[in-house]
Amino acid sequence: MSKFNKKKKGLAAISTASLPDIVFMLLFFFMVSTTMRETDLLIKKPALPVASEVKKLELKSLVSTIYIGKSKDARISGDKIQVNDKIVEVKDIPSFIYSERALRKEDEVKFMTTSIKADKEASVGTILDIKEQLRDINALKISFSTSRGNDLSSNYK
Amino acid sequence: MARRDIGEINAGSMADIAFLLLIFFLVTTTMDVDSGIARKLPEKTDVQSDVIVKEKNVLDIVVNRNNQLLVENEFVKVTDIKRLAMKFIDNGGGLGTPIDNRPGEPCDYCEGAKDPNSSDHPSKAIISLQSDRGTSYGMYISVQNEIEAAYNELRNRLATKRYGRSYDALLSDYKDNPSKSLQEKIDNLKDKYPQIITEPEPIK
């Protein structure tokens, strides 16, 4: 009996000194491996309008985003368009869509959606110009990005 | 007596684990779900066919650069659009579009006023949204949203009457398990109240 007792007594506490290191390792792993920020905005972050009848965008990998907003520099007026980390003109939109298409498989192209993230202060003229460009190259599925809400009065003042 | 000797697990690192979880969730929840109003652009055609549309089958919505709204030449507020659009689409005052050489049928599911001076049939009712280049995007989206809301409400109403479930419920069911019968129901509803929105050239 006394022999068994002795054995149990000998069991030492598990050293937890290395646990923080493991945890930090995990943390760094996640920090490095998650690449969630798609683009850095060069324009002022667009304040999206509010809408109640919104649909979630399916198939995220097939979405190409166009940002429209004011320039960060307050002295520059007018709407700026940003795609993929650079500011472009309306006439450059087709080439952007073509480059996006080139990255996808051919049978997926028809499911590709263009998401327009525009500031609510932006002018409709810019949006319609972009729509016309998209129509020209047969990128027909678009989504006007909005945030969900029921009070629409903040959209117009 | 022997049990007491098992060493306690050091809880000092619990804080680290908690921080890890916290940071992980902080990071993952900033993935904003991209949602918005979906629209399908009309295809570009070289042939310009002149379709003659009766004046009464078109609901004219005009937005000027001061974000003022004009529906059928009357000043309205954004919140009025849904009601006006629903009244217009659901009027059912005449015959529908002829399909396969058969003459069009009157709208048997419409609950509108059947006013002969308003739209004939939901399949003929066209909403025209004319905006100015200087209109603000927020206003434009609001109007689009109201039009969408009008169609959704009409579809919801018909779906509840026919299938006992709303259109939204059918759509979310379809997303969870896509089945043939659901697809048919949804297509049928879309067919009954098709979205016909036209956007003429903006006012310069």
Image (cartoon, rainbow, N blue to C red):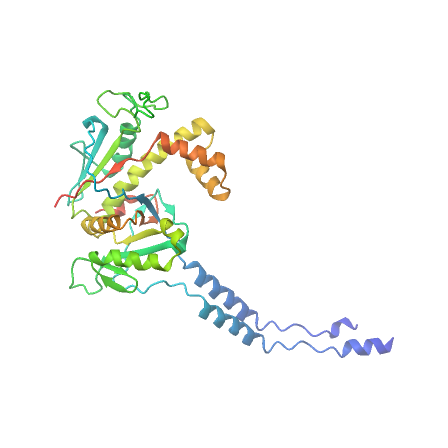
Q: Look at 27% across and 47% down and name the residue there.
A: A154
Quadrant in which the N terminus of chain B appears: bottom right
Q: Quadrant of residue B64?
A: top left
Tell me: B28 left or right of A84: right
Is the residue B180 above or below the residue B10 in the image?
A: above
Location of residue A45 in the rendering, given as x and y in whole percent from the top left corner: 28, 60
Location of residue B25 in the rendering, given as x and y in whole percent from the top left corner: 47, 61
Residue A68 visible in the snapshot: no
Is the residue B130 above or below the residue B27 in the image?
A: above
Location of residue A141 in the rendering, given as x and y in whole percent from the top left corner: 32, 47
Question: Residue lying farthest left?
Answer: B204
Q: Look at 32% across and 52% down and name the residue there.
A: A115
Residue B119 visible in the snapshot: yes
Count of numbered labels shown in the rendering: 0
Tell me: A1 left or right of B186: right
Depth check: give the residue in front, B59 or B196.
Answer: B196
Location of residue B20 in the rendering, given as x and y in whole percent from the top left corner: 51, 68
Depth check: give the residue in front, B75 or B42.
Answer: B42
Depth check: give the residue in front, B195 or B4.
Answer: B195
Q: Quadrant of residue B57?
A: top left
